[in-house]
C-alpha cells in the first residue's frame, strides 16, 4: 500500500466522522442525505471508512431505518482484499480510530487542562462554588466556570476565564473591583451583578447597584447599568435589556429563567449542568422560549425546554444528546 493510499484512507475516515455528526444533527434534511449518499457511493474506500467509523463510535444500533439500509448496502459492496492488504487496511483504520480518540482527548481535556493551570477557582459539571474575599465580597461560580483572582495592593480584579459568576461586592472607591472577560471589563460601582462569558460574547446583568461595562462594540466611555438592567455585547454588536432584578443570577438560586430567548441560547445556559455534548440543530436554535426551569434536575429541565417548542430529546449515549 502506498503513502497515497494511506492518505486517501485517512481523508475518507475524517470525512466519515464529519458525516456521522451531520446526519445526527440534520436527520431530516434531504440535501444533506443526498450529499451523503453521493459521497458513500463514490468509492469503496468511502464505504469502508463509513463502516469503520460507525463501529468505532458504537452508534450503528441508533441509525434510523433509512441509514440502516445504507449500512446493509455498504456491507455487500465492500471490495474483497488479499490478506496482506486487509491487515494493512485494518492497521490504517486502527490508526485512524486512535487518532480520532486522540483528537477527542485534545479537544475536551486540553482546554480543561489549560483552565486548571490558569485558574484560581474552577467548577465542574453541575457544580457551583461560593468564594469569600478578604474584603467581605463574595463570588458564586456557576457550573463549568473558571476565574483567576488578583486582590493585591490597590487592585481588586477577577478574570472570568470561562462560564458565569455572580458577584456581591463591597464597594471601595479607592480599590474599584473589576471583572475582566475577554476584551470586556465590568467595573463595580457598589453592586450585585452577574457576568457570563462564552463564545466571544459577554452578558452582564445587575441585581442591585450599578456597574460600568467597557469593551467590544460598547462606546469608548462605557455603558452604565443599574438595577434590573442588562446587556449582551460582542466585538461588533451590543444589545440592551431590562428584566426583574431577582432574575439576575437566578441560577445561583437553582433556577434557569428564559424570557423570550432563542432555544439555542437557553440550552447553552443549561449545558454546564449536563454531561456530554448537547446538539441543537440550526433550524431549532432560533425558536423562542420562555419559562422558569429547575436546575435541581437538569435532564428534566432539558425535556421541559424541548417540550415548550413541541420538540423531543434523543439520547444516543451518555455523552451525546440531540434535540429534534
Image (cartoon, helix red, strand yellow):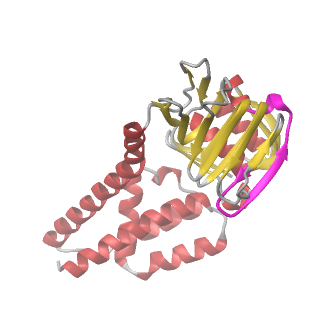
Left or right, residue 73 beside residue 302 = left
Q: Quadrant of the N terminus?
A: bottom left
Q: Is residue 77 visible?
A: no
The residue drawn where x is 52% and y is 51% is 62
Choose between 316 and 254: the one closer to the eye. 254
The residue drawn where x is 62% and y is 46% is 185
Which range of residues does the magenta coloring cover?
232-249
Q: Is residue 76 above or below residue 282?
A: below
Q: x, y percentage for residue 96?
A: 29, 62
The residue drawn where x is 47% and y is 77% is 39
Is 245 colored magenta in this rendering?
yes
Choose between 83 and 209: the one closer to the eye. 209
Is 311 colored magenta in this rendering?
no
Choose between 254 and 56: the one closer to the eye. 254
The residue drawn where x is 55% and y is 21% is 133
Left or right, residue 84 beside residue 243 = left
Q: x, y percentage for residue 89?
A: 22, 68
Residue 64 figure quarter:
bottom right
Choose between 98 and 202: the one closer to the eye. 202
Amino acid at each position: 500500500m502506498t503513502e497515497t493510499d494511506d492518505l486517501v484512507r485517512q481523508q475518507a475516515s475524517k470525512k466519515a466522522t464529519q458525516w456521522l455528526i451531520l446526519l445526527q444533527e440534520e436527520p431530516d434534511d434531504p440535501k444533506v442525505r443526498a450529499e451523503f449518499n453521493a459521497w458513500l457511493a463514490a468509492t469503496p474506500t468511502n464505504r469502508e471508512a463509513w463502516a469503520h467509523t460507525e463501529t468505532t463510535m458504537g452508534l450503528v444500533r441508533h441509525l434510523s431505518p433509512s441509514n440502516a439500509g445504507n449500512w446493509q448496502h455498504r456491507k455487500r459492496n465492500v471490495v474483497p482484499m488479499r490478506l496482506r492488504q486487509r491487515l494493512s487496511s485494518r492497521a490504517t483504520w486502527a490508526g485512524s480510530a486512535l487518532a480520532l480518540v486522540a483528537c477527542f482527548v485534545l479537544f475536551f481535556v486540553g482546554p480543561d487542562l489549560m483552565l486548571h493551570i490558569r485558574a484560581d477557582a474552577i467548577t465542574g459539571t453541575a457544580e457551583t462554588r461560593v468564594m469569600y474575599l478578604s474584603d467581605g465580597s463574595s463570588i458564586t461560580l456557576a457550573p463549568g466556570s473558571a476565574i483567576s483572582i488578583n486582590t493585591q495592593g490597590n487592585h481588586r480584579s477577577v478574570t472570568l476565564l470561562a462560564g458565569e459568576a455572580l458577584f456581591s461586592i463591597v464597594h471601595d472607591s479607592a480599590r474599584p473591583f473589576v471583572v475582566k472577560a475577554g476584551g470586556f471589563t465590568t467595573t463595580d460601582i457598589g453592586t450585585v451583578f452577574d457576568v457570563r462569558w462564552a463564545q466571544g460574547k459577554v452578558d452582564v446583568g445587575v441585581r442591585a447597584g450599578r456597574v460600568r461595562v467597557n469593551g467590544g462594540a460598547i462606546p469608548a466611555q462605557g455603558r452604565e447599568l443599574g438595577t434590573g438592567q442588562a446587556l449582551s455585547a460582542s466585538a461588533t454588536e451590543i444589545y440592551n435589556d431590562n428584566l426583574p432584578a431577582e432574575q439576575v443570577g437566578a441560577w445561583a438560586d437553582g433556577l434557569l429563567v428564559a424570557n423570550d430567548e432563542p432555544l439555542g441560547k437557553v440550552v447553552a445556559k443549561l449545558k454546564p449542568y449536563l454531561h456530554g455534548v448537547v446538539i441543537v440543530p440550526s433550524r431549532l436554535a432560533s425558536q423562542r422560549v420562555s419559562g422558569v426551569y429547575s436546575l435541581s434536575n437538569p435532564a428534566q429541565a432539558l425535556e421541559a425546554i424541548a417540550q415548550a417548542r413541541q420538540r423531543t430529546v434523543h439520547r444516543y449515549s451518555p455523552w451525546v444528546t440531540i434535540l429534534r
